[in-house]
Amino acid sequence: MILLPQKVAYRGTLTGLRISAVNGTAFIDNLSGATLDLGSSVVNAAGTAAIRISSVDGTAFVDTADATLAAALAANAGKYLIITDASGRYLKGWIKAAGTGETLGADVLAGFDFTSGWGTTDAAIVDANTFNATSEYGFVYKLNVFTQGSLYKGSFDAVNSAGVSEVRQSGGARLLADGETGSYYNAAAVSRTILIRSNAISTVDVATLTLEPVLTPSTDGCTIVSTKGGTTYNFESKDASFTYNATSYTYTIYDRDVTALADGSHLVEIYDASGRMLRGYLGAAGDGEDLGEALNVSNCANLTYDTFDGVSPTAFHAIEIGSAGAGGTADEIAFVANGMVKVSFTATLTSGQAPHITQRRSLGSTSIGSQVQAVAGANAIYATLTEANTGVIQFANNAAAEFTIADLAVKQVTAPSADGCTIVSAKGGATQNFSVKDASFTYNAATNYVIVRKAR
């Protein structure tokens, strides 16, 4: 029998992948940098709904009155949204966050006055709010009203002596019918001109005309960004011929995270720079990082800092005058081979550079984990240990510096966050082990090459 190749669902280089390879509790974390192609992604929601769209770059969002879609948007922050019109044209982007309430900008037609700044075509202005259409579809117009792609909310009410009045964007669809209140319109056309027209020779007396830009979505909508986890509020891609202001659209929400494949039936291979490998099956998506009790319970200790005071199990103040300062926790941290620790603290820097952090057998001895440069402010440093030992977390500076460490906590990481998943050793299995672990595999690398395949 000839076996077909296993389908590759993801292949790429990940930065900052966290690995715990302890038999019985194996997992990987920080997978948010991996994005599945659509063919390998999981569909979380799909349907048809009326959708309001703001497609202007910098403030993109969608909104709806459809309860099913609203619930799907709220439940899928960080997931990928495709909106498709009746002709198969699309908008694509990443759901950033649920809306917190619709907000409106200033009315762009506030205090409208046909006698000031308005032009005519087959029409004559009578007064500030009245005009005569001198032929069928005669209109008054105002330039430079719209921002292309923006969503507007408007109201229009008029008395027409012989026909029907409407508000339009020049070159675009009807914006407001006579008598509409609180209606929405995406200014998709290139023209920035608004016009009010009559379908008959008549006198049009406008009582109400408002047009307010919609700045943020309601609690039923969400903001859209152009990249996964991004902060630029644009759609990732917009079909140039997409039909805006349609009655309804089809939508699909995809989970493009590797954790979406954590179902026990996908094989993962993790490679270091030398081609050494870890292999296992993606078990279950994490539901929140779990930590053990603090392992640092005795006062911190000095090795070579010129000043080392303010000492407690969770804090110290250090000054290095020369170029070889070091100190850290007491020699009591119970490291687990291939296990992961989280070192969290706040560094207040007085001068020089913040210290670099390592895990060691004792202060000044061999490193058995990673080396990470701390930053001023809050720090959360993860490291996988290469051996079982009782050791220390060492802080060190190779140049003059003064700093204070507070809220120091060293804890074993026992389960992955929502950006990670457990690893099992067999397809559909429950034992949290890697099935293959190269004894020389390099943990704590800056990057790893990762392949995820559908298992046979």
Image (cartoon, helix red, strand yellow):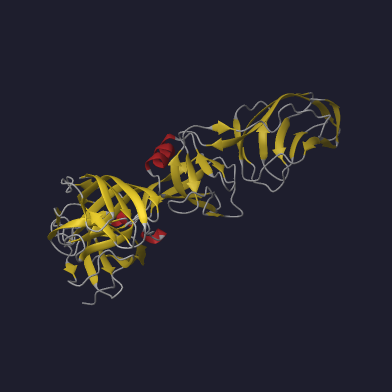
Location of residue 318 with respect to 120 vertically, above or below: below
Left of 131 or right of it: where is 221? left
- x and y, in percent, of residue 82 in the image: 47, 51
Q: Is residue 273 visible?
A: yes
Q: Is residue 417 visible?
A: no
Left of 41 or right of it: where is 363? left
How many marks the image carries: the answer is 0
Specify the quadrant that holds the C terminus: bottom left
Residue at 65% x, 45% y is: 148
- x and y, in percent, of residue 353 in the image: 38, 56
- x and y, in percent, of residue 298 in the image: 15, 46
Query: Hey, which residue is sitting farthest bottom in the picture?
Result: 2
- x and y, in percent, of residue 263 in the image: 24, 55
- In-front residue for pair 421/306: 306
Location of residue 327 with respect to 55 vertically, above or below: below
Residue at 62% x, 26% y is: 181
Left of 157 or right of it: where is 19? left
Residue 208 quadrant? top right
- In-front residue for pair 345/128: 345
- In-front residue for pair 243/235: 235
Residue at 25% x, 58% y is: 304
Location of residue 5 with respect to 153 vertically, above or below: below
- In-front residue for pair 167/447: 447
Residue at 34% x, 57% y is: 321
Specify the quadrant that holds the N terminus: bottom left
Residue 264 quadrant? bottom left
